[in-house]
Image: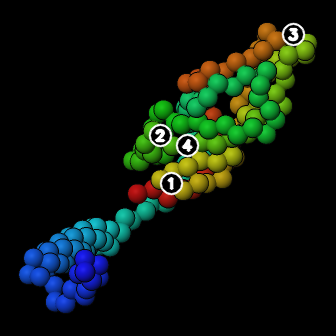
Amino acid sequence: MLTQQIYKPMGRPSSTRRWAARRWTNRLRLIMFGASVAIAVALSGTLGSRPVSLRLVTIPAGTELVAVLDRTLSTASTKNGQTVFLETREPVRVDSAFTLPAGLLLRGEVSHPAGPGKAPGATGLTIQFTELEVGGLSYRIVAKPFQARGANDVLNLPVGQLLRITLSQPVTVEHP
């Protein structure tokens, strides 16, 4: 007898169940409405805004970029072709009216690391810089190679070491 009552079809849901179902349906509608409003606000902020106009700026040949190393370089552990990143610490003066802000990224590659076991004074490394990143866009550059020579068996350039990189050719970049 008890099993018949448990498996007996329920029929029409009780008023409490109908109320609970309506309550959850209303909550879901409110959540969906809030999400759609949030999406609309986010899109209107990006799509409705005016596009940023970019200015073409030419950095002349001979311009010196003062940048710092992002990691220590040592002739004991640095390999030929290893990538090096630097960040400019000073604004780059393009002309009398315009200056690029500090914080531009430079990318270079180590070449000819002369490590321990060489003749005294022969320890050193060369970094050839190949890219400059301005406003999230990368540009190929031609710069004089940075060369460091040491008197000891091992040459270390610590994190934060200031390097001065001179552009050999002008480079045109886009900047807001």
Counting residues from the N terminus, which is met first, the one under dot 1 or under dot 3? 3
Identify the residue under disc 3. Answer: 120
Q: Nearer the viewer, residue 151 or 79?
A: 79
Mark 1 and 2 residues: CB-CB less than 8 Å, in contact? Answer: no
The local crowd at label 4, few if under 14, some if 14 to 19, many if 20 or more residues have their Cα within 10 Å, is some
Considering the numbered disc 4 on the image, is that residue within a helix, a strand or a loop? strand
At x 76%, y 29%, the residue is: 78
Identity of the amino acid at label 2?
A: Gly
- Could you tell whether 41 is left or right of 146 in the image? left
| Most distant residue in the front direction | 1
Mark 4 and 1 residues: CB-CB less than 8 Å, in contact? Answer: no
Identify the residue under disc 4. Answer: 105
Identify the residue under disc 2. Answer: 103
Considering the numbered disc 3 on the image, is that residue within a helix, a strand or a loop? loop
Identity of the amino acid at label 3?
A: Pro
Counting residues from the N terminus, which is met first, the one under dot 4 or under dot 3? 4
Identify the residue under disc 1. Answer: 136
